Image: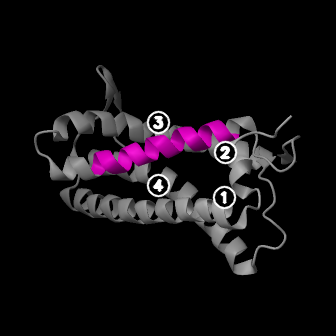
Amino acid sequence: MNTPDKSTGHFNLLARVLHWTMALMILAMLFIGVTMVASLHLRPMLVDIHRPLGIAIGLLVLLRLYNRLRHRPPPLPADLPWWQALAAKTSHWLLYTLMLAMPLIGWSMLSAGGYPVVLWSGMNLPAIAPHSPAVYTALRSAHSLLAYVLFATVLLHIGAALYHAWIRRDGVFPSMARGPRK
């Protein structure tokens, strides 16, 4: 059932909590990923953070998608140009796709490389791809490329949010930033 939030004009509480929690997690992942590539010294520690954080993001995006399908987001402003409305919808679904694809590709990549996906001591995820150096290489390249796409999409998303908050002042930003005022 696809029901709107009772407080029209705002995302429901679960959507807001997931949005901001995942925003912090994704920003952390992007910086962890860059530092993992740049620092051999910090790499082992960062990999130990990167893997479970990626799996957590993958699980949370499933919850987020379920919530979004059950609770319609507030409508975009009626006076928003059609191309901006299309860009908003497209970028949101691109973000969902990337938030789901990145952990799956990372998990598949490690499986293809023969590496265990350790969540914590004694808890490993099963392999989901056959051991293959060629598949590992392709998936590693895809993971890296999509990380850049995710970073660019996040920057555009932040830019659009600030545009709505500071220039248009049309209620789009507060609909996700806070609940309705009582």
Residue at the (75%, 45%) spot, across then down: 11
Report how far apart the C-alphas of labels 1 and 2 lie in the structure: 10 Å
Contact (CB < 8 A) between labels 1 and 3? no
Amino acid identity at mark 2 = Ala
Pointer 3 residue: 56
Task: Report the front residue among 165 and 95.
Answer: 165
Q: Amino acid at mark 3?
A: Ala
In primary-sequence order, the first of circles 2 and 3 is: 3
Give the magenta range.
15-33
Q: Which mark is residue 101?
A: 4
Which badge, 1 or 2, comes first in the chain's sequence? Answer: 1
Reply above or below: 63 against 152.
Answer: above
Position in image of residue 59 (x %, y %): 53, 38
Disc 3 and disc 4: Cα gap in Å?
13 Å
Query: Badge 2: how crowded within 10 Å, few (<14), some, or many (20+)?
Result: some
| Residue 98 shows in this picture | yes
Q: Nearer the viewer, mark 1 or mark 2?
A: 1
